């Protein structure tokens, strides 16, 4: 079987926009061949500027640079369909497939933030994603969601039948994200001029990360109970509101924004931190929570969307708008050595439930389901094949 994977969102550039979807695509391509039958052939469709390569995956490079969204959309919708006839199965790795497509298809959907937080996108991009994601999910034989939360949103927001969705949780790099040697941590701490104790947030600075709530809860602590708070991540949509909140609350001296953190440095940041704080109100998965737990860092996060799925009982999961409970949790994590030790052990155990190999294994299983239904005409719904009323 020959499988084509649209990997045009693979990024070779350093920056916060190269994280997330890029991590999913690159790790899936790295692990799919080892989880699939030997006679399966994988071909990744990428832009002309992408230099990445993966054992067991052939790379089909476009003749044009598709790094810009408009060029990528033009390639996917106007030019790419002509080369898809040679595949037995096509995997749209990020929301959208060509509107004109004859090959059987599966699609991965990460979250529906373009519906939950529409103002973060231009009207054109929002309409494109909404219309084409809905169309792609309707025509796909299987829809892959990276969490149960996203699967629920797909059914609730886009009407995708539950039986058509396969949940494929993400993994992490086990060689990188782990407890590190004290000597390495101490060296990095000196290099970055980090305090001995601090709290850490990592993520794009944007409204759904809910940082104003964290800053308000932090500001309620007496000064002698505040550990330095470090915010790592690129400044995204409406980041100015976060910096304004820092100034309004008088936190410029105790809260520091260090900007985007390269992937290679993330394990060191997690290992140095006394606790990882992630107050997000909406996540397709919440990979930073998993990475922090894998490094043995205690986690406080919210009980919103997918985050409880990732954290399990290893973290404190708090309501995302309850300032009093967040303040109490910060005070407790600062004082309670026993809780931090327990959270560290539980987090390490919890993280072992997730791996990229497992994500690839579940993806292969979804491919099998899709190809087991060769008799299904493209565009016909799952419910119609079961004889249910429309």
Image (spheres, rainbow, N blue to C red):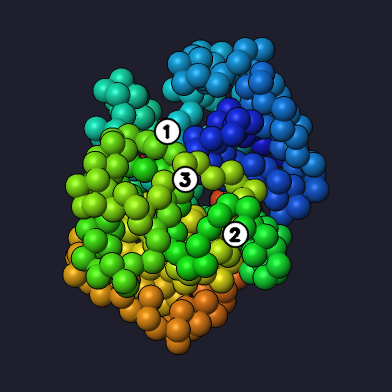
Q: Badge 2 is on which residue?
A: 189
**SS type, badge 1:** helix
Disc 3 crowd rating (10 Å Cα; few below 14, some 14-19, many 20+) is: few
Q: Position of residue 362 (x, y in %)?
A: 59, 56
Answer with mark 3 or mark 2, whichever residue precedes in sequence.
2
**Nearest to viewer (mark 1 / mark 3):** 3
The reply to whether residue 292 is in sight is no
Q: Badge 3 is on which residue?
A: 258
| Quarter holding residue 235 | top left
Disc 2 crowd rating (10 Å Cα; few below 14, some 14-19, many 20+) is: some
Q: How far apart are marks 2 and 1 (CA)?
A: 47 Å
Q: Position of residue 4 (x, y in %)?
A: 65, 32
Q: Which quarter of the image is occupied by the N terminus?
A: top right
Q: Where is residue 315 in the image (x, y as percent from the top left)?
A: 41, 73
Disc 1 crowd rating (10 Å Cα; few below 14, some 14-19, many 20+) is: many
Q: Which residue is drawn at 57% across and 76% down?
A: 349
| Quarter holding residue 313 | bottom left
Task: Tell me if 303 is positioned left or right of 200 in this view.
Answer: left
Q: Badge 1 is on which residue?
A: 136
């Amino acid at each position: 079987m020959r499988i084509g994977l649209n990997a045009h969102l693979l990024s070779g550039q350093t920056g916060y926009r190269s994280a997330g979807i890029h991590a999913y695509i690159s790790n899936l391509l790295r692990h799919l061949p080892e989880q699939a039958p030997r006679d399966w052939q994988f071909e990744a469709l990428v832009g002309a500027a992408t230099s990445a390569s993966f054992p067991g995956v052939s790379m089909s490079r476009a003749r044009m640079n598709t790094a810009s969204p408009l060029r990528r959309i033009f390639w996917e919708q106007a030019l790419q369909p002509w080369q898809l006839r040679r595949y037995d199965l096509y995997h749209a790795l990020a929301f959208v497939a060509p509107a004109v497509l004859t090959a059987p298809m599966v699609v991965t959907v990460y979250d529906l933030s373009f519906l939950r937080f529409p103002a973060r996108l231009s009207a054109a991009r929002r309409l494109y994603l909404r219309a084409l994601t809905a169309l792609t999910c309707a025509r796909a034989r299987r829809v892959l969601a990276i969490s149960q939360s996203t699967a629920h949103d797909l059914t609730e927001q886009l009407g995708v039948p539950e039986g058509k969705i396969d949940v494929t949780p993400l993994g992490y790099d086990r060689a990188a994200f782990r407890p590190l040697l004290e000597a390495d941590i101490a060296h990095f701490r000196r290099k970055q001029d980090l305090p001995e104790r601090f709290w850490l947030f990592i993520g794009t600075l944007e409204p759904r990360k809910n940082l104003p709530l964290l800053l308000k809860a932090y500001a309620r602590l007496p000064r002698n109970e505040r550990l330095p708070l470090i915010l790592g991540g690129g400044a995204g949509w409406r980041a100015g509101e976060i910096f304004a909140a820092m100034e309004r609350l008088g936190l410029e001296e105790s809260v520091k924004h260090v900007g985007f953190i390269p992937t290679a440095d993330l394990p060191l940041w997690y290992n140095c931190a006394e606790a990882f704080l992630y107050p997000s109100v909406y996540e397709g998965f919440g990979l930073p929570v998993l990475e922090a737990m894998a490094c043995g860092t205690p986690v406080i996060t919210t009980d919103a969307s997918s985050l409880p799925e990732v954290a399990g009982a290893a973290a404190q999961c708090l309501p995302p708008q309850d300032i009093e409970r967040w303040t109490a949790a910060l005070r407790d994590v600062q004082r309670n050595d026993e809780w931090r030790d327990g959270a560290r052990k539980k987090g390490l155990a919890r993280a072992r439930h997730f791996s990229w190999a497992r994500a690839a294994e579940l993806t292969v299983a979804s491919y099998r389901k899709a190809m087991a239904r060769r008799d299904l005409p493209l565009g016909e719904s799952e419910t119609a094949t079961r004889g249910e009323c429309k």
